[in-house]
Amino acid sequence: MNAAVLNRADDGPALIAVDIGHATYAALTDPRTAFWALVDKTLIADQIKAGALLDRYREKADDFARELHALRFELTPSGVYLNPTERCNLNCTYCYLPSEQRSGGSHMSEEKLIAALAKLRDYFRSVMPEERKPRAIFHGAEPLMNKAAVFAAIDAFADDFAFGVQTNGTLLDDEAVAFLTSRNVSIGLSLDGPLAEITDATRQTWGGKSVHDKVLAAMDKLKGYGSWSVITTCTTENLPYLTQMIELFHAKEVPTCMLNTLRCTQPGARGVKPADDAMAKAFFAAMDRSHELYRQTGRKLLVANFANILIGILAPTARRLMCDISPCGGGRAFFALAADGGLYPCSEFIGLPRFSGGNLFDSGGVDAALKSDAFRVVTTRDVDTFAPCSDCAIRHFCGSPCPAEAHEMNGGMDRIGAFCEFYKAQVNYALRLIADGKADDYLWDGWDESTETTFLMA
Amino acid sequence: MSQNVQAQTAQTSQTTPSAKPAAAPTIAIRKSCNPDGIGLSHYVLMDTAKAK
């Protein structure tokens, strides 16, 4: 992205021009507040010196700054990612959890899981409004390896949490589907290829067996359910097939998918990391295909990670994913509980003991963890304070994820994440869609029903 | 698929794609709400009403 400071008045907001690759429009942004406008390129010199845009923005700049500050620094947790077991029946190439845990780790007992949820319920009651339920997501390793404990916990705390399960789908039999769907549990699956040989390149059992067909069968069982999704982790192995993934998901009536860049926290992931430009090319082709299918059928397949980029631009506080903001949501919007009771800012850190904030069953519990140095180093990671993010026009649309991979792959919390150029390309793509009046086609219907319009020029 | 599953409101929507608007010299939109996102790249829930 080419960005140049065109106006930096000492006593007012500064707008930065960004070439978004659109025939008619360029963007003007104030990165400090995540404000943006698309301006006819032939008029941009006039707009930046004076005029209605700058006048109206100056009236709102302080409000936008306060709003962004509150989003970035004043949230309290409203969700927890629970790891009810260390074990997984798969050995995926890019997993962020250590292989020795996944192959031979421990389950959390049912009694301990129940006790953990009781403590978590009490914590959330102390920080959340009574009318809101906290979210509790069973997460991996593979949570259904400890299915009996997980299902007992869901029934025991049905009134206290909105539950979700992120599973590899291989243990999602008819009984499990009936249990979870009858309790309105949100279900996430994972699939990396449109064909078995593509999925098999990164997702197999420890014995090398394919699980592709089992996941497809699980998808068929969930067809028609309102709250399920599939994650595809984008790697060098499946990048040429992302468009086909979209076609498969649309055909299977998947409501929501994610085409995620893999996290490079563990060394194994870095061996299948796509280059940023290749990732962008394949990803945008897949997004274009999703739009074609929508135009042909009138049915949307929501690509949630990209939808979140769009929402982060249109309504920063309405974002659902908390990775693409700095500080990220880890340790402040949510936290993670490991199977041994350890508390971490996010599941991504569970394989990194230095980021443990203590144990849920210690006297300090969640409160102590949130205040721990291990959490603070994540919750204070601020793209305003380190280069090259501090000069980047889109730093609050991106957040330079993820702190775990920045630390492990690039050497510190004050380093960029693994896909800096891809994020810039995504923001440009999103701004071009807004310029062309297509943004709503990539968002779920009613996405802005609970929002208030605070700035509008169109 | 259980009856309860069928009773759920599916997120897959049947709507009309956006029409291209007439070009405006300036486009700027910002919306605001109370933040409550907790998703991460390993999990997503986009139907915000479910957890309320």
Image (cartoon, helix red, strand yellow):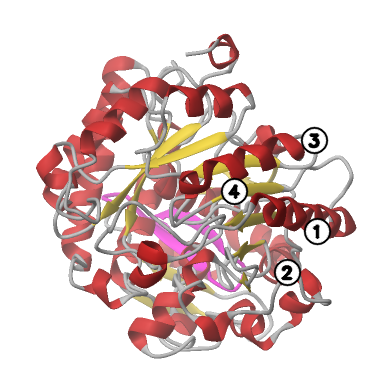
Amino acid type at image mark 3: Asp
Chain containing the residue with disc 1: A
Q: Secondary structure at mark 4?
A: strand
- Are discs 1 and 3 less than 8 Å apart at CB? no
Ranked by sequence position, the earlier of labels 1 and 2 is 1
In percent of width and height, residue A354 lies at 54, 86
* Residue depicted at 76% across the width and 68% down the height: A74
- Are discs 1 and 2 less than 8 Å apart at CB? yes
Q: Are marks 2 and 4 on the same chain?
A: yes
Q: Are marks 1 and 3 on the same chain?
A: yes
Residue at numbered disc 3: A159
- Are discs 2 and 3 less than 8 Å apart at CB? no
Amino acid type at image mark 1: Lys
Residue at numbered disc 4: A137
Where A26 falls versus A2 (above or below)? above
Res A98 seen here: no
Find residue A119 and name its label. Answer: 1
Find residue A447 and name its label. Answer: none
The answer to which quarter of the image holds residue B49 is top right
Q: Secondary structure at mark 2?
A: loop
Tell me which segment is drawn in magenta. Answer: A22-43
Q: Callout 3: few (<14), some (14-19), or many (20+) C-alpha neighbours within 10 Å? A: few
